[in-house]
Amino acid sequence: MADRRPIYLDHHATTPLDARVLDAMMPFLRDDFGNAASVIHAFGRRAAAAVDDARERVASAIGAAPDEIVFTSGATEANNLAIQGSARLRPGHRDQLVTAATEHPAVLDVCEALAGEGFGTTVLPVDAEGLLDPAAVEAALDDRTALVSVMTANNEIGVLQPIREIAAVCRERGVPFHTDAAQAVGKLAIDVEALGVDLLSLCAHKFYGPKGIGALFVRRRRPRARLKPVQYGGGHEGGLRSGTLPVALIVGMARALELCVEELESESGRQRELRDRLLAALSSSCSGVTCNGHEEQRLPGNLNLTFDGVDADRLLLALPDVAISSGSACTTASPRPSHVLLALGLSEARARASVRIGLGRGTTQGEVDLAARRILEEVRAQRSAAA
């Protein structure tokens, strides 16, 4: 195994850049290097035309209008713009935020930072399967609520929240609704109009695009979403996000999303079959294996598993030939157990015995079978050593 390339099953952390995406980017990394804001000459005009085309393609992929797409450096910046931009719009009047306990740190940490400035934050619990009750959201709303932020698909347990129902509650009460859809876009059919969301974050490197580029959908149609910028310096992106646009990354993002939409139905079905095959192989051959999160309402390529009597970090170290994780890539440096699993009611010990598996476009049946065999070997070895 030492000379073999590891099997990559950590597609929630990041995805490999698709070769077709790199091909689309290359001209803008070499010859067409112009600044999209410098339209006085041909170099800038070519760059601006490429950005306009990419903006249209990204918008089309999620049911938005081109002028509703604001390019950012990724979902973290998009989340910050959505949450801070909403909170700071009318401080003292609309200064309360509502979110869920299982959100990504790019949402929870922003809310915590704003709480330190005097903004109010309500963090709603989820049930044992990771689902948030829309009625709980409704009960948390009042005339001071500036924003509700609930992710579409969880980055650890893959659970799909009832976004349409939550958005409807918010719309009825006149409260803007934001969803972090970084894990959902490219894996699920997303239509911002059908969902009824006002703000939606997405990130290219989660769907086989380049790192360093993302976007925020900002509704321009009634009811219009309004934000205060959190970054200044030139008034780019309709005044919401100043900074020179990375043309090659934007082109790559659009191409990556376009490919995901084209292949979504077949790829989702394929990954779901592989996921179920992997789960069956692990649970039928090993006792004390629990799948965390809702069994059906989850991403097609996601598994989050607890192995009783096993330390997840030790398990990962024993599997250099299989790339899986013990939680969010943004919290792996933390000694604390997963806040997502704790929110589901798992004990700290069970949370520390859990691993996240993310299948992707390049995952094969042979890799799934080999990964199952290797995981089972190491789980049995760790249990035997502890006996």
Image: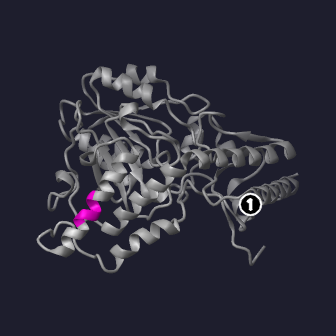
At horizontal 40% and vertical 50% (from top left) the residue drawn is 202
State which region is magenta.
48-52
Image coordinates for residue 92, horizontal then vertical, percent: 18, 33
Q: From the viewer's perspective, tell me whether residue 344 is left or right of residue 217.
A: right
Residue 349 in view = no
Q: Which quadrant holds residue 5?
A: bottom right
Characterize the magenta stretch by its predominant secondary structure: helix
Q: Could you say where residue 305 lies in the image, as x and y percent from the top left?
A: 70, 45
Left or right: residue 284 versus residue 127 is: right
* Label 1: few (<14), some (14–19) or many (≥20) C-alpha neighbours in 10 Å: some
Front residue (pair 16, 99): 16
Q: Residue at x 50, y 51 (%)?
A: 262
Residue type at mark 1: give it.
Glu
In this view, 285 is above or below 370: above
Name the residue beneath numbered marker 1: 367
For the residue pair 174 and 141, the one nearer the viewer reads as 174
